[in-house]
Image (cartoon, grey):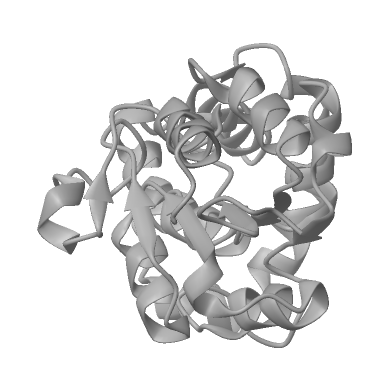
Amino acid sequence: MSQGMFDLVMFDLDGTLVETAPEIADAVNDLLRDQDQPEVSEHLIRAWIGHGTRELLLHAYAHATGLEEDTVRRTGTLDILMPRFAEFYAARTGQRSRLYPGVLDTLKVLRASQVRIALVTNKEQRFATTVLMTHGIRHYFGMVVAGDTLEAKKPDPLPVRYCLDAFKVRAARSLFVGDSEIDVATARAAGVPVWAVPYGYNHGKPIALAEPDRVIPTVAAVAEAVQAAALHPAA
């Protein structure tokens, strides 16, 4: 167990560790073209990221077709779109996404410091795994809790509590790092400290408005805090 300030750090994925919006937008528009519908802007797609792929496609398809979202839900259209999107997204993954600055070094520092690392995302497991594998960081995570892993997803605290239970770590000895008000609300509901980066996908609103415990310029601040705690342990 780590003797520093954290025993477990949980990260969000999209907008926190990996800039995925460009290739998500490409895959969404591949799908819309496939359905003979007009494309939607990457700006809009960025605003829709965070609630899982199904909700993203709901917003995009309703916007492109002019249909009400409730109508799209009722018709079962999403059950048809999801597997088709998976094909397009698999082809696009890794083409225009990138790790944010400091991510790889931070994961290395946490591992070297014996801090457990988990991923908590609303992205479906198959998509999350593809992104992690493509960017060569899957092996850093002792656990991946995706949007379809449990019966509830963020902002429900269940995914975070699941990690705490699995690693047998107290909430006070853990940290959640995300980019959106969803992440802040999730951590708060689980009683976990939360830090947030300002560059991700927060529906166009400054993350400071969600009042995380800290707004950090990059995830490198987590590594810096862990290293500082190791150098100056509490008496």
- Counting from the top left corner in percent of width and height, residue 94 is at 73, 17
Side of 155 relative to 133 (left or right) = left
Side of 102 relative to 136 (left or right) = left
- Counting from the top left corner in percent of width and height, residue 225 is at 43, 37
Choose between 61 and 217: the one closer to the eye.
Answer: 217
Choose between 78 and 21: the one closer to the eye.
Answer: 21
As drawn, 111 above or below 161: above
- Residue furthest to the front in view is 235
As drawn, 69 above or below 196: below
Tell me the residue at 58%/36% (across/down): 28
Tell me the residue at 46%/38% (across/down): 222
Side of 173 relative to 134 (left or right) = left
- Counting from the top left corner in percent of width and height, residue 48 is at 39, 51
- Counting from the top left corner in percent of width and height, residue 63 is at 36, 51
In which quadrant of the rendered image does the N terminus lie? bottom right
Tell me the residue at 46%/26% (across/down): 220
Q: Is residue 115 visible?
A: yes
In which quadrant of the rendered image does the C terminus lie? bottom left
Q: Is residue 53 visible?
A: no
Tell me the residue at 29%/61% (across/down): 181
Choose between 92 and 200: the one closer to the eye.
Answer: 200
Side of 1 relative to 102 (left or right) = right
